[in-house]
């Protein structure tokens, strides 16, 4: 089994990456040392910086995952601020902001950053389109999953096993694995 270190403090992300990569013959080891997240307009530079910094600090190849929810009618908000908004407002307040909006289209995006010590960071991006639900539904997943509607059911309702076949994270990891091979 090939081993890979994943720097993240997010248990939900770790479990998904672990499950998706296990099937492909990887053992994923979580490292919770963290890295300062740049304030950027998009996720790629945040993931690249986090991967580079972590690879040098730990002295081994590492991966990170910077992800977020982009709501079209809010010009992509919360996007790179997704963690901050999740923590400080939460799903109920996001639903409140979206209360009177008819365009509910949204996108989840995941950027996997990978770097080896002394090397340049690489990024692999995956997205999935959906809609902001009108209420929180389901107990699966984590974070924004209960309000992210994918073809009529939320990721919270659909559960991890299904989510992992179509998610932004799965799509980003597919690209990463293709590159690794
Ligand atoms: O330690 P790190 O990896 O940075 O963990 P984090 O939770 O801070 O993660 P991000 O900086 O990437 O912020 C992304 C936010 O979006 C949420 N999120 C990311 N992927 C998600 C997914 O697949 N489903 C639901 N919410 C998600 C996540 O819970 C965070 O609040
Ligand atoms: Mg974070």
Image (cartoon, rainbow, N blue to C red):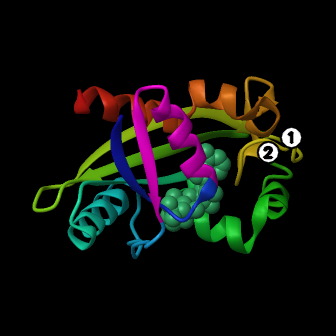
Name the image quarter holding residue 45.
bottom left
Using the image, determine if residue 110 lies above or below residue 162. below
Q: Quadrant of the C terminus?
A: top left
Tell me: 32 left or right of 159: left
Ligand 1 location (quadrant): bottom right
**Mark 2 crowd level (few <14, some 14–19, many ≥20, 10 Å Cα):** many
Residue in the picture at 59% in, 32% down: 129
Label 1 near label 2: C-beta < 8 Å? yes
Q: Which residues are magenta?
A: 12-31
Query: Which of 94/115 is in front?
Result: 115
Residue in the picture at 35% in, 47% down: 4
Q: Position of residue 130 (x, y in %)?
A: 66, 33
Asked if the stretch drawn in magenta spans residue 148, the answer is no
Q: Position of residue 66 (x, y in %)?
A: 45, 55
The residue where tag 1 is placed is: 138
Residue at mark 2 to residue at mark 1: CA–CA distance: 6 Å
Tell me: 84 left or right of 98: left
Query: Which of 101/67 is in front?
Result: 67
Judged from this view, the residue extending furthest toward the left is 118
Which SS class for mark 1?
loop
The residue where tag 2 is placed is: 146
């Amino acid at each position: 089994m090939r081993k890979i270190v994943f720097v993240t403090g997010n248990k939900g992300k770790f479990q998904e990456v672990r499950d998706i990569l296990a099937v492909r013959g990887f053992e994923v080891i979580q490292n919770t040392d963290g890295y300062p997240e740049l304030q950027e307009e998009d996720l790629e530079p945040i993931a690249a910086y986090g991967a580079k910094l972590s690879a040098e600090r730990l002295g081994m190849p590492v991966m990170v995952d910077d992800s977020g929810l982009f709501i079209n009618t809010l010009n992509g908000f919360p996007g790179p601020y997704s963690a901050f908004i999740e923590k400080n407002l939460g799903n109920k307040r996001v639903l409140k902001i979206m209360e009177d909006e008819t365009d509910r289209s949204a996108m989840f995006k995941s950027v996997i950053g990978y770097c080896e010590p002394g090397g340049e960071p690489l990024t692999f991006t995956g997205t999935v389109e959906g809609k902001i639900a009108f209420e929180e539904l389901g107990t699966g997943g984590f974070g924004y999953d209960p309000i992210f509607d994918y073809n009529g059911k939320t990721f919270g309702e659909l559960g991890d096993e299904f989510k992992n076949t179509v998610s932004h994270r799965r799509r980003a990891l597919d690209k990463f694995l293709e590159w690794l091979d």
